[in-house]
Amino acid sequence: MTPRTNTTRPPSHEDRRGMTLIELLIVVIVFGVVVSGALAFMATQNSAFTDGSNRLGALRNLRYAVGTLETDLTTAGTNVPQGQPPVVYAGDDVFAFTADYTSNVRTDVSAVYVDPSAPDGMVAAPRAAVTIPNASWSWPDTVYEVGGINSPAELIVFWFELDPTTDRSDDYRLYRSVNGSTPDLVARSLLKDENKPFFQYNRKTFDNTGASFLTPIPDSLIPLKHEVKIHSSAADTGRFAVIDSIKTVRINVASYNLREADTGGAPEATLNRLVDLPNTGFGVLLTCGDEPILGVGITTTFELQPDGEPALRLNWNAATDEASGEGDVIRYVIWKRVNGAAWADPFLSIPAGESAYTFLDTAVESGDQVQYGLAAQDCTPSLSPRSAGATVVVP
């Protein structure tokens, strides 16, 4: 058999030709365009994710701050005894109120919360004056008791304060304090919502049909202070009672990304919340059922005036039915008789609303024998039996 001849021609160098430089350059350019597009897309997505995360963080910060405010503010006035004001101070950046917020007695059903480990100084009304933050004013200026026992309603204060730890000039922190204790930091990295104050207030008013509605309290009246010692007393009326009519608090606050504390960036989120105060906005109803109980006496002491003229100082404490009992005493009536004469018409009446009272009588003469009588009057109006003080001879 004749052998077959292999006629396959081996490949030449021309058949093994690779990519030209131009072709390689085109491939590199196309690949670069594809990679650049992919990187740009990934950068956009990453930026969007970061922005969303920042906004979410700012919103969470806001929600926590406002949620804490809302939770606590709604307790204002809870189990507050008669005579103690539910709202103490209402400013554009501070709000102070009283409430039976915490008790350390396990069986206490009146307090909002029970914490057996809470110290005694944090579960009752303060007995010493507490300076209200962001205000040159202190409260209380009297002691609130129920049956001789300290009131269970403590003083709770929330306030916004500039943060000194950042380079921003508009950066605030929110604090909370009970009875003037060391404040707790609630939230930071907070801003004002444009030019709005942090707190705004609405009061409860009535029209001529007796229907109630909410009316904004003008910023010109802020801050409001409970300057009358005894809430719902005869003196707690007119302009002094505006703070007692607060029914809602509007919270306006913004926040920014915590990682941008020193950049001065715009707010990431804002939050406005209207908080109802269910236990405020109305006075304590006076019963005026029975004849008022005075239960205290009047004392008289001599005082020499700066001009050398004689005077007599009258002193008495709040009546039994003002400090407790029916709580319906609205004024005190005073009589005066000289040199054993019969009691005539009263010569003086003083509105209730204090824990102790004093009056300087300058209409006396040396050698006079003067005696004063005191009675309490309720809203019926009825008078208590008159209590006569000792006769004093004017030197």
Image: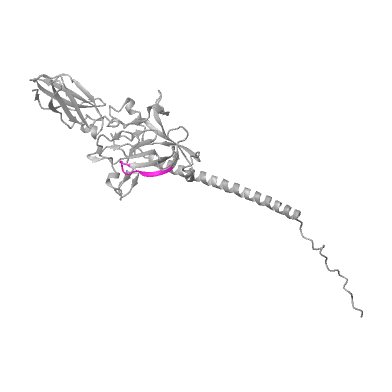
Tell me the residue at 27%/44% (across/down). 121
In the shown orientation, is residue 383 left or right of residue 12?
left
Tell me the residue at 68%/50% (across/down). 33
Residue 274, quarter of picture: top left
Q: Quadrant of the C terminus?
A: top left
Residue at far bottom of view = 1
Q: Residue 187 at x, y = what percent?
A: 42, 43
In the shown orientation, is residue 306 left or right of residue 114?
left
Note whether 261 is above or below 202 in the view shown: below
In the shown orientation, is residue 163 left or right of residue 384?
right
Q: How is the image coloured?
A: one colour
Is residue 180 rendered magenta in the image? yes
User: Which is more toward the observer, 263 or 255?
Assistant: 263
Residue at far right of view = 2
Q: Residue 202 at x, y = what percent?
A: 41, 31
Note whether 184 is above or below 84 in the view shown: below
Instruction: Evaluate whether residue 159 shows in this view.
Output: yes
Is residue 231 rendered magenta in the image? no
Q: How many marks?
A: 0
User: Which is more toward the observer, 170 or 137?
Assistant: 170
Q: Quadrant of the N terminus?
A: bottom right
Q: Residue 148 at x, y = what percent?
A: 22, 39
Q: Residue 63 at x, y = what percent?
A: 46, 43
User: Which is more toward the observer, 190 or 102?
Assistant: 190
Span highlighted in magenta in the image? 178-188
Instruction: Evaluate whether residue 386 shows in this view.
Output: no
Residue 245, quarter of picture: top left
